[in-house]
Image: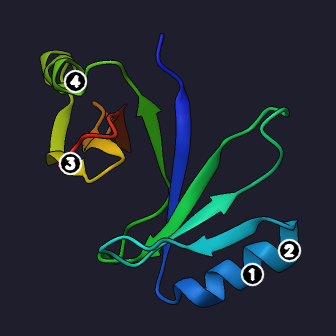
Amino acid sequence: MSRVVHFEMVGDDTERMAKFYSDTFGWKVQKWEGPTEYWLVITGEDSKPGINGGFGRRTKPDEGTTNTIEVEDAKAAVATVEKNGGKVVNALHPIPGVGWQAYCQDTEGNLFGIHQNDLNAK
């Protein structure tokens, strides 16, 4: 089985969004030092149930929350998505020093991410 390990929420003003969730729920939000505008979100202690996530800038009017599922083999997972009637909407790509990521849609059009950890990804 593969689990949801990360969520992404998008907004037009990520700083305002970060302040809202920090002030409202006590989430710890820190700007990522990577090549794109992204905020890392810690929603609670690792010892308790739940997942952490991130905030990014909205690039399309209909974008919303995306859950990311961790897999052992991202290439195989993308192939399985397509075999089972899903669609790849953003091809598998490296996130340098983090891993491999792709974005897909299920048979109902729901967007989700696939992630394989790989510190050597380039």
**Circle 4 Cα neighbour tier, 10 Å, few/some/many (<14 / 14–19 / ≥20):** some
Q: Marks 1 and 2: in contact by CB < 8 Å?
A: yes
Measuring 77% from the left and 38% from the top, which residue is drawn there? 46
**Circle 3 Cα neighbour tier, 10 Å, few/some/many (<14 / 14–19 / ≥20):** some
Q: Amino acid at mark 4?
A: Val
> In the figure, 97 relative to 39: above or below?
above
Residue 3 at x, y percent in the picture: 53, 24
Q: Amino acid at mark 2?
A: Thr
Q: Which residue, given by chain and number where applicable, does mark 3 sit on? A: 94
Q: Which residue, given by chain and number where applicable, does mark 4 sit on? A: 81
Q: Which residue, given by chain and number where applicable, does mark 1 sit on? A: 20
Instruction: Give the mark, 1 or 4, whose residue is nearer the N terminus.
Output: 1
Relative horizontal placement of residue 62, taking residue 38 as reference (left or right):
left
Alpha carbon distance from label 2 to label 3: 33 Å
Q: Secondary structure at mark 4?
A: helix
Q: Secondary structure at mark 1?
A: helix
The answer to which of 109 and 49 lies nearer the viewer is 49
Alpha carbon distance from label 4 to label 2: 36 Å
